[in-house]
Amino acid sequence: MRLLLLAPPGGGKGTQGERLAARYGVRHIAAGDLLRAEAQAYTPAGREIAIYQARGDLVPDQIVLDALTPAVVEAAAGGGYILDGFPRTLPQASAAAELAARLGVTLDAVVYLYAPEEVLTQRLLGRASQGGRADDVADVIRHRLWVFAETTGPLVPYYTERGILVAVDADQPPDSVTADIQDRLSGLRLTRLRGHGGGAPI
Ligand code: ADP
């Protein structure tokens, strides 16, 4: 199973990513977590990453690709992955497609988790009140949501055109979201078994 999770901040990528990875027995690769780990390691790249993350801006594509590619290559060889938060820009999507082609793998589906902006903001503020992340403060949250709409949003039509986008309502309890994702994915598998369409090398 090779999946991509596309969701705005607060959409539940992390929670659903972990569950799907356990369900399908593949690695959960969370871009934000990998980048935060690199930032905490105080490498030269890490110091730069920390600045972008603190502002709620996207980390430059080349740094992201350098940080993520080894994990993707390793997971692809090990049976698959749930990519959470990568790709997040159109150039990253092209680079990911090239990498997949080089590895001879295809993407089964892109799961897009959507929810109203007020719901996302409330979730992130709620997480902040329980000692959440440094970027879970009101003005940075607003900026992250704006960056998502501007820069990551175009990936929705991009993957729709490629016939692999599965949109799921994320404004439900986590178990219902997981159930909806699994239903949609098994529906997709049946359609493919019957010979209508397949994965995409992206
Ligand atoms: P959220 O989706 O709630 O913002 P993440 O942990 O996925 O949480 O991302 C946190 C931050 O990490 C982002 O604001 C950005 O700075 C950086 N980041 C994560 N994934 C990417 C990516 N694919 N490209 C660029 N920056 C990224």
Image (cartoon, rainbow, N blue to C red):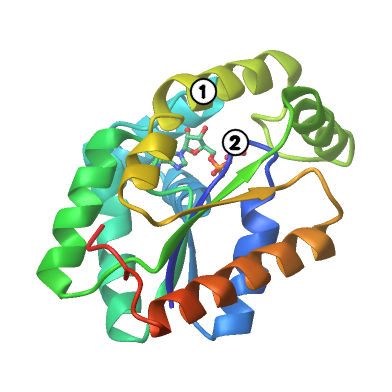
Image position, residue 123 (x, y; %): 82, 36
Q: What residue is pinned by disc 1?
A: 149
Q: In the rendered structure, are the residues bearing label 2 and label 1 in contact, judged by CB atoms less than 8 Å apart?
A: yes
- Residue drawn 45% across and 19% down? 150
Observer-nearest residue: 8 or 164?
Answer: 164
From this viewpoint, which residue is outermost toward the left? 102
From this viewpoint, which residue is outermost toward the top? 139
- Say above or below: 157 vs 4: above
- Say above or below: 179 vs 97: below
Q: What residue is pinned by disc 2?
A: 8
- Residue drawn 68% across and 13% down? 139
Observer-nearest residue: 73 or 90?
Answer: 90
Residue 141, picture quadrant: top right
Q: Earlier in the sequence, mark 2 or mark 1?
A: 2
Mark 1 Cβ and ligand 1 under 8 Å apart:
no
Q: Is residue 182 left or right of residue 161?
A: right
